Image: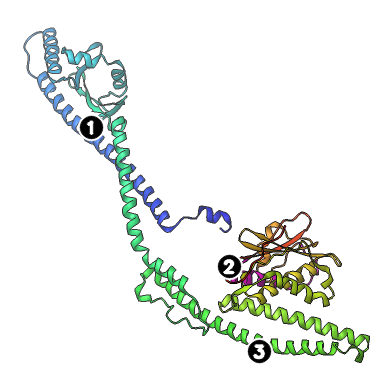
Amino acid sequence: MTGPMQGRFALSIRQRVSLSIVGLLSVSYAGLLFSTDFVIRRDRLQRHERLALAMAEVIQQTLDRPFVGSRAEKSAAGDSAIQNIVNQFSTPAFLVWLSRSGKPPLFPASVSGKDFSVNQPLMKAASTNLAPTKDPVYLRLGNEAYVVSSLPIDGSLGAINFIEDVGIDPSRSRGNLMFLIGVWFALVFVSVLVLDLLLRLSLRPVGRLERALDRLSLNPSGSVEGQQVPLSEQPFELQGIAAAFNRLSERLQHAWTRETLFIRALSHELLTPIALISGTAQRLLHHPGQFDASQLEGLQAIHAESSRADRLARDMLDLARGDSGSLALTSEPFDPLEVVQDVIRDIQVLPWGARVVMKQVPDLHRYVDGDSDRFRQCLLNILENAVKYSPDGSPITIRMGEIQTSVSLQVHDQGPGVPREERDKIFQPFYRSSALAPGTSGSGVGLAVVRLLMEQMNGSVHILDVPDSPGCVELLLPIAAVPGRAIAEPQS
């Protein structure tokens, strides 16, 4: 996924691992609580079952004792014996009673047993789960937990039933829940802190690799010696990335070598013959009487195209030097107003020179630090663009002023302007605006060179919205204090 959404939702490795660990801890903790609750219930059921079996055995043994008398007397004696047994074994937390077919159930006579037996919701819930063939059943009633079971008694007397109050259900207790949530937060907090420390230590090799990438810079000789990352110092998981980094640095060295050769060829093998062609054509044009109209027109075309090729070659040379970090500019105070006035005077000999005018000329002599020749080059590139992309005969206006601590130079034209979404892209090399008419000539290099040179002089270039000018390019250079030289204040 690319675009702004990627940056908005992108997570670091530490964040991803931390979130994964938090999720894993939460799932593990929930599983532990569930399994603990299951173990507790199983233990309670087993303990209750053993106790119920022991009681049922005692009751059965009591009933199996021989008795001499009538059947009615034996039945009465049996009821009395069972009553004594349920009275003996019943407690406030353990209810024992006898359910008989065709007879009312026999509950314990103790007060605690009576109070326990009159819990109607409990007895109703227990009655639905009591059957001699069932295993003990775990019941939840509100926050309380119970275990109920039933065992048959031989002799068709019925079944002996048990209800055990096992206390508050741990999973339903608010206090327990708050405690467990607090323990979960503490575990997550401590785990995240420990994990963050471990990840910082584990990701140190990644940080070293990142710093190595930042330090990767090629010197003019094209050597990347000392920029290689030793594979033996990297963890196994990063050795592949480190090896790829080393291969990348080697490819950069080869690319830099080829770029250096290209710059040298451009400087010596291309610029020199172009300059000879342009200079020869210019000298011949100084003697127009020696040529007829067609020859003179051809010489003018040769001079114009060679001059254009010379500027294009120099612009590309500047871009190449800028990419390699070998572009060198002088830095000394100069008056940008003087440079603008010199440019306007020099371009008057060009066919479009008369279209360039300067309006609202202030007595603005604010000195800036930079390279005056490069500033002149920036202004010429912008003027040529304005002439190329504006209607024939339309004026090109230059305005200068002071904006806070900078000198502003604006070039206004009547061209199509630049769409807002493309105002940064047009300063990229070889980019052509979509607002240009089809077939419009241009290399897309001039404005890229302007931005490069302005940034080298600690300045900037922008596209502005101006009501009376569809196209407006602004150059900004910071004002420099020049000791020993008078600086005239601007006049209103």
Q: CA distance from mark 2 to mark 1?
A: 92 Å
Mark closest to the chain's N terminus, 3 or 2: 3
Determine whether label 2 and label 1 are within 8 Å by CB.
no
Give the residues in magenta.
435-459
Residue at x-position 58% and y-position 84%: 260
Q: Nearer the viewer, mark 3 or mark 1?
A: 3
Query: Is 443 a magenta residue?
Result: yes
What's the residue type where badge 2 is placed? Ala
Residue at x-position 31% and y-position 30%: 174
Q: Does residue 111 lie above or below 52 as drawn?
A: above
What's the residue type where badge 1 is placed? Leu
Residue 358 tag number: none
Determine whether label 3 and label 1 are within 8 Å by CB.
no
Residue 268 tag number: 3
Q: Does residue 238 lie above or below 258 as drawn?
A: above
State the SS at label 1. helix
Q: Position of residue 476 (x, y in %)?
A: 65, 64
Give the labeled residue for mark 2: 481
Left or right: where 491 falls relative to 141? right
Residue at x-position 66% and y-position 85%: 266
State the SS at label 2. loop
Residue at x-position 68% and y-position 80%: 314
Q: Nearer the viewer, mark 3 or mark 2?
A: 2
Give the labeled residue for mark 1: 45
Which quadrant: the C terminus?
A: bottom right
